[in-house]
Image: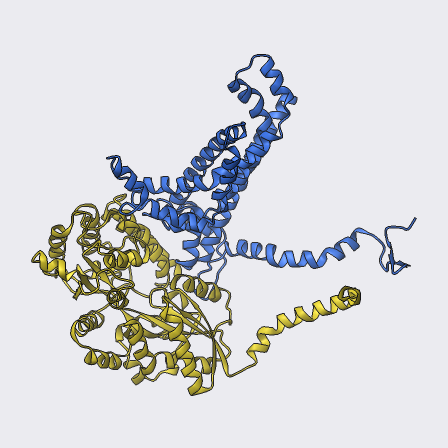
Amino acid sequence: MPSVAQHTVSGRRRRSPLPYTWQRGYLLASPALLVMLAILLYPLGYSFTMSFFRWDLSGSAPFIGMANYTDELFGRQFNQALRNQTIFSIISITIEVVAGMAIAVLVNGKLRGMRLARTLLLVPPMIAPAVVGLNFRWLFNTQYGLVDALLRMFNLPDIPWLNHPTWALVSVIVADVWQNTPLMVLLFLAGLQSLPQEPLEAATVDGATPWQRFWHIVLPLMRPIIMIALMLRIIDTFRTFDVVWLMTQGGPGGATNLLTVYSYLLAFQAVDFGHAAAVSYIALGMSLFVLGLLYGIPWLIAKRRAI
Amino acid sequence: MMSANLSRRKFLAASAAVTAGSLAAPWIARADANEITALLITGGPLYPKYWEKIVQDFTAKTGIKVRYDLLEFTPLTAKVVTLSAARSSQYDVYSTHTAQIDSYFNHFAPLNSYFSDSELAEFYPVAVKYLRDPKTGNLAAIPRNMDSRVQYYRSDIYQEKGLKPAETWEELVDVGLKLTGNGHYGLVVPGQGDPAQRTFSDLLWQAGGDWVDQANKPAFNSEAGIKALTFYRDLIQKHKIVPPDAVGYQWNENSTEFSSGTVYANFDWPGAFATLSNPETSRVVGKWSTAPYVKDKAAISCAISHAMALNGQSGRKDAAVEFIKYTVGPEAQRLQFDQFTNFPSSQAIAKEVISAAKGPQAVWLQQLETTIANGKEWPKLAGFSKVCTLMFSAIEQALTDQVSPADSLNQAATEAEEIMRRAGAYD
């Protein structure tokens, strides 16, 4: 039998000049690794380095240690952005997961028209976030917007969607929920359809109500899918930009300034790349921390139970 | 078959050749000394034709070819910032603007040595002054056209109601209150970002204040500044003569509100004259007129300019400067005015244009020229670009009643001084 290092080319047996070792594997993969280093790790490392310098096009770029980080962590604008980011992430993800699960359970049933409903669910995630942002900007316009026009039709008061700080944050959450809930539905639907039927059938025979079946059987079995969905959305909310930028540009008065928007403003309006990089890495650190909690807490609980 | 003839060795050799070719392409292109590259501004369907004509005429006269890319103002600014940070020599010439020029003092090559004093004296002094680095005196860019604002108002509605365009802040409120109702508003002002800062800036100067004091320390939180921001906020929140969504408006929304007929007065830029006269872009053709900007203690508004800059990294500076000179020369400025009603940066060309104009256009040009001649711009101190971002937020917070004007300005002044100190404005 020929060894792994031997090849058959044009019917002739050839011995490879190099033995099959792990070095050879790296050698063969090196072009791809070099490209990856150049286009992925180099900019990442460069921007991380940048966050420790005063990098503002002033000519000199002195090393300033953690100053960019401390400036931001104790700064008014960063704290406003952080507060907005926390509210935006928690509320959006909660609504998307709860509503996503509810709709998934509904469309999982054998009701008429569910096939069409499942197809329509694909539409919002397929639309570019920039288009969603522009559409919601018009929908929520107080003078010409469809939403306030409908409220007026029912003699209800106008809502200052985009010009009141609180309502502006509500508006961007609504747009985000509209776009991303269907994605949760599709994920949960896939999970629901792959659940084993035996425990559910046994529970039905034992007289469990639909709610009891959902709460005690479906939800625990769906936990891995829910975890994946949560992770995806946490990563996503920390890099939300387009929808917010096109709806409010972070306004009014910074009320919808998320960390990404704030970082963009620092880099391209304030021309302060050092602080912009620091904000980006704080956001990255925060999302990794939240993901770590999401992984770590269930792991710790399981470990304690095992003890 | 092709695949049968293509050995691994040939494939690798071909790939290496293609890669080497593509890597060498910029240097091969750079080898042509008679060709320069430019990143230019666009802003409407007429701009590409304008630049094409400028470039063709320039090449016909000088033999220097120009390869150029067009971008709208915001992405253009982002790209210039990025390329400057990367010390890129991709473009020899940049379109730029007075607004953020302080960020580029170390990246644009000084143009002083390419223009004589008498040539520079031809341009509006306000533009040349604010394109210079106050520390070194170097001229970072040369003005291509002037931008300032006058009042555009609905002459038909004003006549119907027996009103005259406002001259003072008090009249602005009075007239606005008489015109607001039934889904219409007496006035529109922007309320976000750079446009909000410009509007505050005008009101600050009109109230007798300024951005910085003699020692370049922030002074915008003076009594005049607080009065200006309070007046600005009250237009929206107290008198309600402005559409409530204005706190999210920038220039485009303001122009659209006026050209659609929803609001009856607006302070707009020179390009509005052409837009409002065109039935394709305006519902109020023939129903509007212009008047001078309002005033409080003084009649001061910002006078800024789109400008042309030479990339400090350029390897073909002389050819690039030839192109820059052509774009600010008489032919290009006249063409610019004819196509976009952009106001010339050269005083001599401006005089020619004004004397040739007739009727409402002549009146408007006179009003615009007065604003430009008396105009100002915010300081070009180190770090002021970052102060602007801070001011956007401070002004917006006051306009949306999240913070009082005094608190907002005082807090911003403290932070602004620290930003400018760190950036070296007081060294």
Q: Quadrant of the C terminus of chain A?
A: top right
Residue A188 vs B404, above or below: the answer is: above
Q: Is residue B97 left or right of residue B208?
A: right
Residue B93 vs B253, above or below: the answer is: below
Q: Is residue A140 left or right of residue A20?
A: left
In this view of the protein, which residue sits in the foreground, B295 or B243? B243
**Occupied quadrant, residue B283:** bottom left
Q: Residue at x 35, y 55 (%)?
A: B389
Chain represented in yellow? B
Residue that protrudes farthest toward the right in the picture:
A1
Chain represented in blue? A
Q: Is residue B140 visible?
A: no
Q: Is residue B223 left or right of residue B324?
A: left
Q: Is residue A92 visible?
A: yes
Q: Residue at x 24, y 45 (%)?
A: B404
**Position of residue B400 measured from the top left corner of the image (x, y, whole percent):** 27, 46
In this view of the protein, which residue sits in the foreground, B27 or B12? B12
Q: How many marks?
A: 0
Residue B387 vs B244, above or below: the answer is: below
Residue that protrudes farthest toward the front in the picture:
A112
In this view of the protein, which residue sits in the foreground, B78 or B330? B330
Residue B323 vs A37, above or below: the answer is: below
In this view of the protein, which residue sits in the foreground, B306 or B104? B306
**Position of residue B76 measured from the top left corner of the image (x, y, whole percent):** 42, 65
**Position of residue A50 measured from the top left corner of the image (x, y, whole percent):** 51, 57
Residue that protrudes farthest toward the left in the picture:
B162
**Position of residue A15 measured from the top left corner of the image (x, y, whole percent):** 89, 58
Q: Residue at x 46, y 82 (%)?
A: B319
Question: Which colour style is shown?
Answer: by chain
